[in-house]
Amino acid sequence: MPVIETSAALLILWAVIGYLLGSIPSGVLVARALGLGDLRSIGSGSIGATNVLRTGSKGAAALTLLLDAAKGAAAVLLARWLAGEDAAQLAGLMAFLGHCFPVWLRFRGGKGVATCLGLLLALAWPVALLCAATWLATAVITRISSLSALVAALSAPLWMLLLGYWHLLALGAVLAVLVFWQHRANIGRLRAGTEPRIGAK
C-alpha cells in the first residue's frame, strides 16, 4: 500500500475521475465508427479488444486495445501529476472498474485486461512489460485469450514482488482477483473445453 498523503476529498475526486475515464466504451465507439455493428450483440457481448477481433477487423481490435490501455494510463498519470502516488493507484483501480462496469452501458462492460495493462504501464512499466510477455507466451502456446489474461493477471503480484514494487502489491492482488471475477464465465468454458480460440468469430 502507498503512504496515504492525499486528503479524503481529493481521493474521492480522483476516484470519480478515474471511474469516468475508464467507463468510456472505446470498443463500442470504435465498432460503431467503423460500421462493425453493435459490439454488445457480437460474440461474448464484451466491449473489449478480444471481442472486437471477432468482428474480423484486426485494426479495430488494435485501436480498441490502445484506447482501453490509454484510459488506465491517463487516470494514473493525471492523478500522480496533480495529487500523488496514493491518488494514482486509486484512480487506476477505479479506471479498471469503470471499464468493467460503465454507467453508460448499464454497468455491463469489458473484462478490463487492456485497461489493467495501461494502468500498470503508468505505475510500473517493467511489471507491465513482463505481464504482457506472460500474456503473449501463454497466447502463443494455447491461443486462448482468456487463459492468457488469467495467467498474466496472476503473474502481476509475483513480478511486483520480484522487482521490489512492494507498494503496488495490494493493488496487484486486488486487480488479479477482479480479473478472475470478470472471467468467471470464461473459466467455466475453459473447464468444459469450449472456450473459443483467438481469431474465432
Image: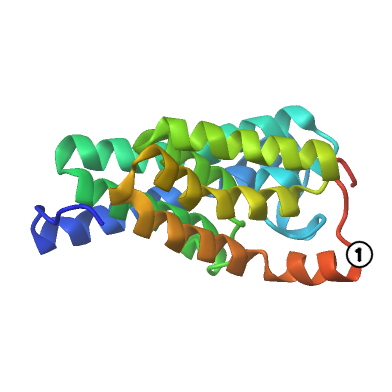
The residue most toward the front is 162
**As rendered, which of 137 and 42 lies closer to the eye?**
137
Q: Residue 131, relative to residue 173: is it above or below?
A: above
Q: Quadrant of residue 31?
A: top right
The residue most toward the top is 59
Residue displayed at 24% across by 43% down = 79
Q: Position of residue 44 (x, y in %)?
A: 78, 60
| Observer able to see residue 70 | no
SS class, disc 1: loop
Answer with left or right where residue 23 lies relative to residue 62.
left
Please, which colouring scheme is shown?
rainbow
Crowd around label 1: few <14 · some 14–19 · many ≥20 (10 Å): few
Residue displayed at 22% across by 50% down = 87
Q: Amino acid at mark 1?
A: Gly
The residue indicated by pointer 1 is: 193
| Observer able to see residue 183 | yes
